[in-house]
Amino acid sequence: MRTTLEIDDRLLKQALTLTKAKTKKELIHRSLQAVIRQQRIERLVGKLGRLPLDLTPERLAKMRADG
């Protein structure tokens, strides 16, 4: 999808430098993925506070192996 955005040049240059992204498109994709990942982590952390979490290292390893 094509979208036109107005982005602060200094912010864009700093982000390109820090991420070493080769294109603006790559930078935007990485940025969106990072936001999505962070929101999922925050949501999971929020749920963990409400769920009983009695995992043993063995049970956790089995859950990881099961997918």
Image (cartoon, helix red, strand yellow):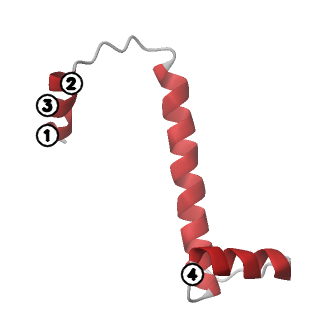
Residue 42 appears in the figure: yes
Q: CA distance from mark 3 to mark 1?
A: 5 Å
Dot 3 or dot 2, earlier in sequence: 2
Q: Residue at horizontal 59%, vertical 64%?
A: 32
Q: CA distance from mark 4 to mark 2?
A: 37 Å
Q: Which mark is residue 20?
A: 4
The residue pinned by badge 3 equals 62
Compared with residue 23, is residue 36 higher up or lower down, i.e. above or below?
A: above
Closer mark to the observer between disc 3 and disc 2:
2
The residue pinned by badge 1 equals 65
Please tell me how crowded label 2 is: few (under 14), some (14-19), or many (20+) other residues with Cα within 10 Å.
few
Q: Quarter of the image holding residue 39?
A: top right
Q: Which mark is residue 57?
A: 2
Please tell me how crowded label 1 is: few (under 14), some (14-19), or many (20+) other residues with Cα within 10 Å.
few
Q: CA distance from mark 3 to mark 2?
A: 9 Å
Q: CA distance from mark 2 to mark 1?
A: 12 Å
